[in-house]
Amino acid sequence: MLASLLQRTKGTRGVVFCDGDGESVDVAVGDPQLSDFDMKVLGAHAAAWLAPPANVQELKIRCSKGTLLCRSVREGYYLVLLLGQDVPTGAAAFELLRTAAEVSTEL
């Protein structure tokens, strides 16, 4: 599902699926400048914002190097999508929501 999300979403550098403790369950990287480890670190850091007590469903962080989109799946699981610089986020957010729904049915 993560590889499919990468293919459907223009400008995606990588995506990681994590559990509530910030441990990666699966990862897909589409940018040769990134490693699986880089995406796992991003996913682990997102756990602080997406912890179940916070009840955050969606999070967007923009910086000069790109945008990080995070989406809760269910039961403490979440997806983190890294977009490149100046990539519009609307379509990516929709595809992330779509993938979160797909992943949720598999849990």
Image (cartoon, helix red, strand yellow):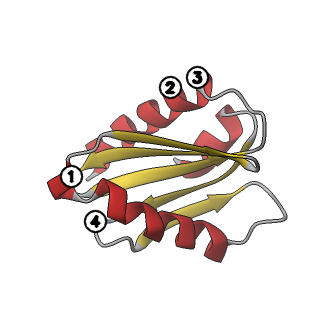
- Which residue was labeled with disc 3? 90
In the rendered view, does 42 fall on the left or right side of 56? right
Figure check: 35 above or below 78: below
- Which residue was labeled with disc 1? 54
Q: Amino acid at mark 4?
A: Gly
In the rendered view, does 76 fall on the left or right side of 42? left
Q: Amino acid at mark 3?
A: Gly
**In the rendered picture of this protein, how many numbered marks are placed on residues?**
4
Distance from the alpha carbon under mark 3 to that under mark 4: 26 Å
Q: Amino acid at mark 1?
A: Ala
Distance from the alpha carbon under mark 4 to that under mark 2: 22 Å
In the rendered view, does 36 fall on the left or right side of 27? right
Percent coordinates x, y for residue 26 in the rendering:
49, 65
State the residue lying farthest toward the front: 64
Q: Which residue occupies 36% across, 53% down?
A: 78
Percent coordinates x, y for residue 7 in the rendering:
70, 39
Q: Provide the secondary structure element on which disc 3 rests.
A: helix
Distance from the alpha carbon under mark 4 to that under mark 1: 12 Å
Query: Visible in this render: residue 76?
Result: yes
- Which residue was labeled with disc 2? 94
Q: Which residue occupies 66% across, 33% down?
A: 8
Q: Which residue occupies 29% across, 44% down?
A: 104
- Answer with mark 4 or mark 2, whichever residue precedes in sequence: 4
State the residue lying farthest toward the right: 32
Percent coordinates x, y for residue 30 in the rendering:
75, 54
Distance from the alpha carbon under mark 2 to that under mark 3: 6 Å
Q: Are marks 4 and 2 in contact (CB under 8 Å)?
A: no
Q: Amino acid at mark 2?
A: Phe
